[in-house]
Amino acid sequence: MAGYDYDLFVIGGGSGGVRAARVAAALGKRVGIAEEYRYGGTCVIRGCVPKKLFVYASQFPEHFADAAGYGWTVPEASFDWPTLVANKDREIARLEAIYEKNVKGAGGETFHSRAMLVDPHVVHLLGEDLTVTANQILIATGGRPAPHPALPGHEHCIFSNEAFDIKRLPKAIMIEGGGYIAVEFANIFHGLGVDTTLVYRGKEILSRFDMDLRRTLHETMEKKGIKIVCHAVSEWVRKRPDGRLDALITGGRVLTVDQVMLAIGRIPNTENMGLEGVGIELGKTGAIVVDKYSRTNIDNIWAIGDVTNRVQLTPVAIHEAMCFIETAFKGNPTAPDHGTIPTAVFSQPEIGTVGLAEDEAVKRFSDIEIYRASFRPMRHTLSGRDEKMLMKLVVDGASKRVLGAHILGPDAGEMAQLLGIPLKAGLTKDDFDRTMAVHPTAAEELVTMYKPTYRVKDGQRVD
């Protein structure tokens, strides 16, 4: 290893890459890391963090309205988009500095440069015009919004990256897509007073989530005033003389809006990095193919995070980074565990979920018990808000193991994080039933649903 400039060189300064670089450096390894844009990656700069800040901003109109039921008189409120963007930028800059500082503090060396592989042990830094060698190389370059070059007028559209920094808040927006990014931004823009239409090619938003959650959220969003058009796609987008956009969608309807946002999936960042020249195997979508330990077909080159297109979540990339450290530098081969991952959709109301959806569980198990509760949460009783909360447990009828937990309502994401622990541990419905409730809370429903709402035996529902 002494013959190389670095024991480890990391390409990509997002959550996974920074974690690997920092921990390896703290172990005394000679570490370099290159990031061509900003340290922090998608999550910190143009993803989870700014999105959650925008979610908070968009919730205030409902908070103001609900306050009346509790005796508060709130003066007429106004919203200033540039203030939100500026405050977001300040917080992102603070976090970015921390990410880079943490690597340097552990003894790693950081570069602001695009990096390309020259051979399995050689990296060229374009911004520095510098070539370095490394014993181990980790690729953590993440992903980006999928473009739609086949759409006539795609050049007039924006993606999630640009949505955080548009110059002025649109009066009307069309968002194409039905995944969590599209759904979250539809709720954000609606909450900020924008006339919002969501267009999705599928039959229901949020594929792969539990169908109860999908339908209930769809209904709730429409009650709020968000227009949702399923079984439709945009066929062209044209700029009008007044600067607005016309978008033709399936069925011949033309929507006139100020912005069209495309949220139709994400693709890995693997182009123009020299991967093919080195011989790294790529999948059909351009994702780097890795084994269960995150190693590529080149023995000393590894890849983690969204660039591998396994599970596109920030905590997963960080977990994969820690497993990489165990495998590559601690002599403890450790495969990332991608099972039973808690996740949240910061819609309004939000979704928190972990484990199997009902449809998926029915395919794997012959006897399923469904415990389901729908109710108005206590916080809405005085406000008068007509918005239901949904809680659902999916249980294996034979072993009584809880296979899935699904929540729609206030603080659902927080509950999902805690539910991830018992589900990961394989606890049973009896364990839930033995747990004392915390009253009065919405979460107590999770331990007080004693009888199944219905069962599904051999694919057939039994009430």
Image (cartoon, grey):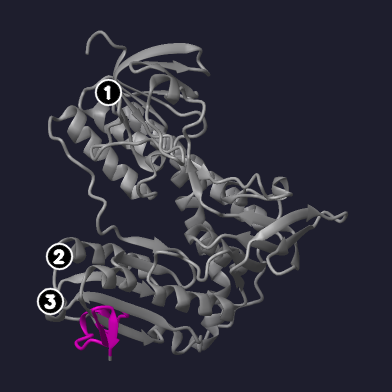
Q: Quadrant of residue 208?
A: bottom left
Q: What's the amino acid at mark 1?
A: Asn
* 143 or 348: nearer the viewer: 143
Q: Position of residue 88 (x, y in %)?
A: 55, 50
- Mark 2 and mark 1 in contact? Answer it, CB < 8 Å: no
Identify the element where label 3 is drawn. Answer: loop
Over which residues does the magenta segment extend?
439-462
Residue under pointer 2: 426
Q: Quadrant of residue 463?
A: bottom left
Tag of residue 300: 1
Tag of residue 238: none
Q: Residue at x 28, y 38 (%)?
A: 321
Q: What's the amino acid at mark 3?
A: Ala
Q: Residues within 10 Å of mark 1 (few under 14, many from 20)?
A: some
Q: Quick one: label 2 or label 3, which is nearer the N terminus?
A: 3
Q: Quick one: label 3 or label 1, which is nearer the N terminus?
A: 1
| For discs 3 and 1, the disc positioned in front in the rendered view | 3
Q: Position of residue 54 (x, y in %)?
A: 54, 58
Q: Residues within 10 Å of mark 3 (few under 14, many from 20)?
A: few
Tag of residue 398: 3
Q: Quick one: label 2 or label 1, which is nearer the N terminus?
A: 1
Lateral position of residue 451 relative to residue 178, left or right: left
Q: Is residue 370 above or below residue 238?
A: below
Residue 457 magenta: yes
Q: Is residue 74 above or below residue 119?
A: below
Task: For residue 146, say whether it is visible.
Answer: yes
Identify the element where label 2 is drawn. Answer: loop
Q: Position of residue 294 (x, y in %)?
A: 28, 36
